[in-house]
Amino acid sequence: MKWFGALLILSASTWLGFAAARVLHERPRQLRQLKAALRALEAEVMYGHTPLADAAMHLARQTTAPLSELFKRFAAALCTEETSAAEAWEKSLRAVWGKTALKQGEFEVMKQFGATLGQYDRLTQQRQIALALAHLEREEAEALDNQARYAKMAKSLGVLAGLLLVILLM
């Protein structure tokens, strides 16, 4: 029975370590996906002259969860509610943000980007997208650095913490 408990403790702590590492791996992937979505939004609005709600629905179909939910909620808010694009964006961002692996820095960048949605002409909007992309590039570099630095450590700490706990309890 002791061995079963020890195995259970070790498995749980290892799982926690791998879950922490998965978040570190997920953040750069989601940042790349977000940058691709912003580039697609730029193309839809600048060259396709697509309305913002339609462009958001196209992005929702092109991206995977949880970012697809962000664009789906944004499009729905634009179509059904009497609200500005900035308010709809921030409301959608707040609703979905907890499901992402992204951090507060990315939230601020996306919130600032959303404040400019629908406010300016196409050229200025394109500059705002480029500015958001530049900030997300910097955040992605930081995320990749953190992934390289801490992912392996998180996995190892999960296993080693479980082993320590098992040894202490035996």
Image (tube, rainbow, N blue to C red):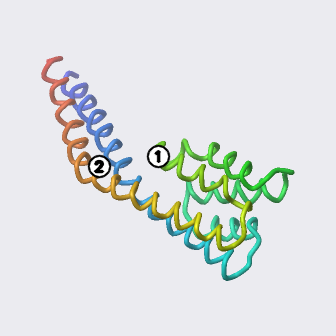
Q: Are marks 2 and 1 in contact (CB under 8 Å)?
A: no
The spot of residue 163 in percent (x, y) is: 16, 30
**Residue carrying label 1:** 105
- Image depth: mark 2 or mark 1 in front: 1
Q: Amino acid at mark 2?
A: Asn
Is residue 109 left or right of 167 when viewed as pictured?
right
Tell which of 45 and 167 is nearer to you: 45
**Residue 28 falls in which quadrant of the image?**
bottom left
Where is the N terminus found, in terms of image quarters? top left
Vertical arrangement, residue 41 with respect to residue 84, above or below: below
Q: Secondary structure at mark 2?
A: helix
Q: Looking at the image, which residue is at 50% across and 65% down?
A: 35
Say few, some or many: other residues with alpha carbon within 10 Å of mark 2 (under 14 / 14 to 19 / 20 or more). Answer: some
Is residue 73 left or right of 36 when viewed as pictured?
right
Q: Amino acid at mark 1?
A: Gly
Q: Secondary structure at mark 1?
A: helix
For the residues labelled 2 and 1, the Cα–Cα distance comes to: 14 Å
**Residue carrying label 2:** 146
Say few, some or many: other residues with alpha carbon within 10 Å of mark 1 (under 14 / 14 to 19 / 20 or more). Answer: few
Mark sitting earlier along the chain (2/1): 1
